[in-house]
Amino acid sequence: MSNPPLQDFVGRHERLFVLTGAGCSTNSGIPDYRDSQGNWKRTQPVNFQAFMSDEHTRRRYWARSLIGWRRFGQAKPNDAHRALARLEANGRCGM
């Protein structure tokens, strides 16, 4: 029996560049931002330019962050996080 395609790919390459999206953390209880068609589910995140140029935007950002912190603070690593941590620990990806 052969390995799944992703496992074969990882096995064939010594170093990997890994880029994940918000979906990597949804199994940990952290919501993603877009639906399956790529549309925003909620208000768009604040961009850097708006954050830096407008005090009201910064206050709104920090207020929303404080409200949402409990969810993020209770999140636990999931299988994807653990797999990425193993790759990094083995020198297969990372900084």
Image (cartoon, rainbow, N blue to C red):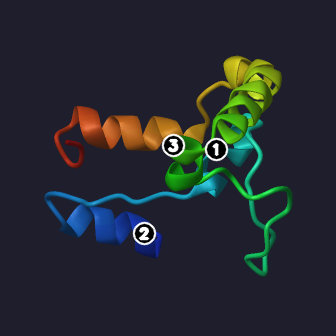
Q: Is 69 drawn above or below residue 18 in the view shown? A: above
- Identify the residue at horizontal 64%, vertical 44% (top origin): 25
**Image position of 60 (left or right of 80):** right
- Amino acid beneath label 3: Met
**Image coordinates for residue 6, horizontal then vertical, percent:** 42, 69
The local secondary structure at tag 2 comes to helix
- Identify the residue at horizontal 62%, vertical 43% (top origin): 54
Q: Is 42 drawn above or below residue 76 in the view shown? A: below
Q: Of label 3 and label 2, which has the lower sequence position?
A: 2
- How far is mark 1 from mark 2, CA to CA? 19 Å
- Identify the residue at horizontal 69%, vertical 18% (top origin): 73
Number of numbered discs: 3
Mark 3–mark 2 CB contact (< 8 Å): no
In the image shown, does 58 or 92 lie closer to the viewer? 58
Q: Of label 1 and label 2, which has the lower sequence position?
A: 2
- Amino acid beneath label 2: Leu
Q: How dense is the environment of label 2, judged by Cα within 10 Å: few (below 14), some, or many (20 and up)?
A: few
| Residue at image mark 2 | 6
In the image shown, does 1 or 65 lie closer to the viewer? 65
| Residue 1 visible in the picture | no
| Residue at image mark 3 | 52
- How far is mark 3 from mark 1, CA to CA? 27 Å
- Amino acid beneath label 1: Ser
**Image position of 29 (left or right of 46):** right
- Identify the residue at horizontal 79%, vertical 75% (top origin): 39
| Residue at image mark 1 | 25
Q: How dense is the environment of label 1, judged by Cα within 10 Å: few (below 14), some, or many (20 and up)?
A: some
The local secondary structure at tag 3 comes to helix
